[in-house]
């Protein structure tokens, strides 16, 4: 089989991208350190940095200090070369953030939306974006890409939101086109739990896992499934909508789409968890507070945690039997309120219910996981576009 030899242009482009990735993950770096990490000679590393600086991709950022000999010039990614926005949408609010290409968040905004009507969805999204852009001192036109996480999933065949009847205003047939037109930047919209899994994959526990499941537990139960390094969304965008999954110990729910409930939701969703805690005498106003109280509730708390762990393990056993992941990440406010104690109980219970024995970890992304995932998703695509196309032509 014939192969195409690497051309100088291709090799330089590969070296440039390798250097940019190192500056992202480890920078600022000196020419000498960058050359050592890439295996390039000092003259080649100097030429590389000159190219990247001419393309405005990197900039000088001070010098080394505290070492023998002359101070060395340090270089870093020029964060202002591109900006992205992420949004986390729930029925109660829209939370937005803007990051530069290094991932540094430069602006945030939260727009409360309790009791909103189905009208004005596009206007509310624009208001949330403009709020974050204003805090960052930017015009919305500077955004290179926007990513949005919402409950449910958009059917790729129709473009309409499914599995989220509780999100008014997001079910219009041409909403995605209207949003893209108003934002005037490339737009991606995905399930909120999928976005949380993107964050876990990029900056959390799943960075080295190509096959993992993220189980999300708040008011609703959901999951994100990553197979061979790619999110599995399914034919209608409904992969991971495990709240509708029939399970032992719950009544069989029919017309699940209309009722917006199912077996796993009835077993381990927010309201059932709150009812479980109250049945054992624990007083709490929210499911998250109920699990937190169970950690300090001695006998009653032990009973609540053991039962909640059992319910989670029953659902996970069904998922594991089909997907066989190497890792399960537990996420969402209600589940993470149980901490390592709950994780251990779920791990032990799952070991008796399933043949595969995946690792179980509590999420590493405790602050704004959906918003973080939206930013990471937008950043990944933007970096590929900017880093791979912004270098000047090489003769």
Image (cartoon, rainbow, N blue to C red):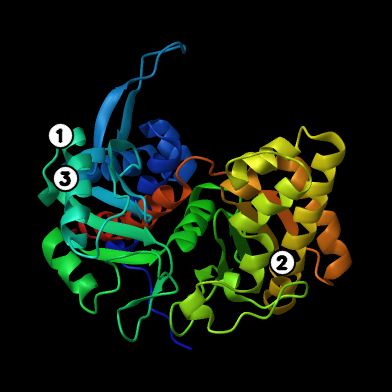
Residue at the spot of label 2: 316
* Residue plotted at (28% across, 54% down): 387
Q: Picture coordinates of residue 371 (x, y %)?
A: 39, 49
* Residue plotted at (44% across, 41% down): 25
Residue 363 visible in the picture: no
Q: Picture coordinates of residue 249 (x, y %)?
A: 77, 72
Above or below: residue 142 compared with residue 61: below
Circles 2 and 3, Cβ within 8 Å, touching? The answer is no
Disc 3/disc 1 C-alpha distance (Å): 10 Å
Circles 2 and 1, Cβ within 8 Å, touching? The answer is no
Q: What kind of element bears circle 2?
A: helix
Give the label, 2 or 1, closer to the camera: 2
Of the pair 379 and 173, the residue shown nearer to us: 173
Residue at the spot of label 3: 130
* Residue plotted at (45% across, 44% down): 368
Of the pair 25 and 182, the residue shown nearer to us: 182
Total count of labels:
3
């Amino acid at each position: 089989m014939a192969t195409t030899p690497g051309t100088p242009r291709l090799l330089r482009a590969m070296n440039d991208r390798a250097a940019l990735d190192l500056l992202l993950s480890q920078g600022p770096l000196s020419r000498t350190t960058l050359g050592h990490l890439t295996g390039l000679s000092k003259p080649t590393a100097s030429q590389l940095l000159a190219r990247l600086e001419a393309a405005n991709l990197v900039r000088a950022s001070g010098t080394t200090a505290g070492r023998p000999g002359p101070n060395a010039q340090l270089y870093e990614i020029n964060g202002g070369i591109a900006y992205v926005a992420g949004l986390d949408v729930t029925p109660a609010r829209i939370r937005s953030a803007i990051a530069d290409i290094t991932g540094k968040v430069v602006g945030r905004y939260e727009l409360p939306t309790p009791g909103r009507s189905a009208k004005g969805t596009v206007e509310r999204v624009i208001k949330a974006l403009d709020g974050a852009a204003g805090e960052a001192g930017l015009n919305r036109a500077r955004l290179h890409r926007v990513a949005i996480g919402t409950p449910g999933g958009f059917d790729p065949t129709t473009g309409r939101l499914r599995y989220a009847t509780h999100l008014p205003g997001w079910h219009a047939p041409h909403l995605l086109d209207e949003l893209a037109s108003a934002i005037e930047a490339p737009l991606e919209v995905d399930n909120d739990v999928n976005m949380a899994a993107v964050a876990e994959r990029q900056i959390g526990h799943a960075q080295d896992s190509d096959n993992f499941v993220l189980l999300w537990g708040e008011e609703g139960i959901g999951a994100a499934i990553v197979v061979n390094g790619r999110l599995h969304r399914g034919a209608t965008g409904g992969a991971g909508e495990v709240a509708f999954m029939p399970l032992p110990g719950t009544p069989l729910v029919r017309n699940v789409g209309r009722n917006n409930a199912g077996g796993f939701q009835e077993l381990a969703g927010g309201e059932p968890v709150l009812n479980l805690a109250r049945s054992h005498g624990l007083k709490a106003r929210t499911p998250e507070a109920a699990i937190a109280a169970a950690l300090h509730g001695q006998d009653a708390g032990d009973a609540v945690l053991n039962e909640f762990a059992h319910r989670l393990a029953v659902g996970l056993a069904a998922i594991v039997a089909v997907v066989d992941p190497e890792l399960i990440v537990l996420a969402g406010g209600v589940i993470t309120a149980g901490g390592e104690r709950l994780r251990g109980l779920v791990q032990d219970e799952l070991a008796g219910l399933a043949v595969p024995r995946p690792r179980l970890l509590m999420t590493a992304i405790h602050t704004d996981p959906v918003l973080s995932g939206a930013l990471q998703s937008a950043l990944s695509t933007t970096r590929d576009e900017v880093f791979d196309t912004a270098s000047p032509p090489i003769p």
